[in-house]
Amino acid sequence: MLDQAQRLRQLANQNDSTTKPRIITVTSGKGGVGKSNFVVNLSITLQKMGKKVMIFDADVGMGNDDVLMGFLPKYNVFDVILNGKEIDEVIITGPYGVKLLPGGSGLTKIDELTDDQRQVFIDKLEKVKDLDYIIMDTGAGINRSVLGFVACCEELIVITTPEPTSLTDAYSLLKAISHFKIKSSAKVIVNRAFDTKEADITFGKFNNAVTNFLKMRLEYLGFISDDRKLIQAVRTQQPFVISFPNCEAAQDIGKIARKLVGTSGSEERMGVQGLFKRIFSIFS
């Protein structure tokens, strides 16, 4: 019996060590809706809850997750591929241990890479272990880059605000995702809502349009209050969940993080190496 119990514990430990992270893409129909701010603060909140998170800044040419975290990275993904850097030299460790992998504008040159260059990079990713979440922050709008990163992920979060233009652009993005049969479901965050009522009404209208006309299934993850503390935090280059941990927006992020953790996500996970194999395949 003792031998059997020991074997079961060993098997459990093996399963724990090989657990692959949930891969989530966060995007929006237009810029300026607070997408990157959400990604950074959600990642820190998840990390504080005991989860291990890596942000992949996949906003080609306009990535600013590093700025929001108060960093200026020296290298990005392509320094690993083209300049012989190790993955450890490129990944930045931020507040509470959140990791950041800068994508850089070089992501547009994926189709120029040789098979050998891709394989060397995939092999180097072996060092990226022990993660619960990889959160990809894409650019905004509808373009090949954004749709490609949506296709790469296991779960999709779309950020909108109650503004009509933001809702229209978010709808257009989901319409393109539906048209190309990239995803059949998405999670939604309403940012900059005055209160719960406005957020609920906003999601209700958006959900009705998407369900009726696009036949996509939406899940409401929650809302983030229109909080002036956010502006102060951005100006000081410090995430608001650190600068103002008790502000309304920080509490809202906490609720969203707990809801996200409470869902299981995709049963079949590809892991970080699988993610980049898919990126190389889609962008080639």
Image: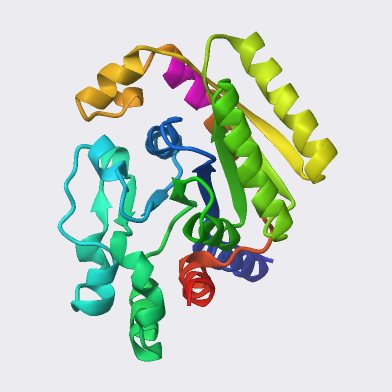
At 77% from the left and 45% from the top, the residue drawn is 216
The front one of 79 and 128 is 79
Q: Is residue 227 above or below residue 240?
A: above
Asked whether, in this view, residue 284 is left or right of residue 102, the answer is right
User: Looking at the rendering, in which quadrant would you find the N terminus?
Assistant: bottom right
The front one of 49 and 22 is 22
At 24% from the left and 28% from the top, the residue drawn is 238
Q: Which residues are magenta?
A: 249-254
Q: Quadrant of residue 103?
A: bottom left
> Where does residue 147 sit, x and y in percent of width and height?
56, 57
> Where does residue 207 sit, x and y in percent of width and height?
75, 31
> Where does residue 149 sit, x and y in percent of width and height?
51, 59
At 61% from the left and 70% from the top, the residue drawn is 7
At 40% from the left and 89% from the top, the residue drawn is 115
Q: Is residue 155 above or below residue 200?
A: below
Is residue 265 highlighted in magenta? no
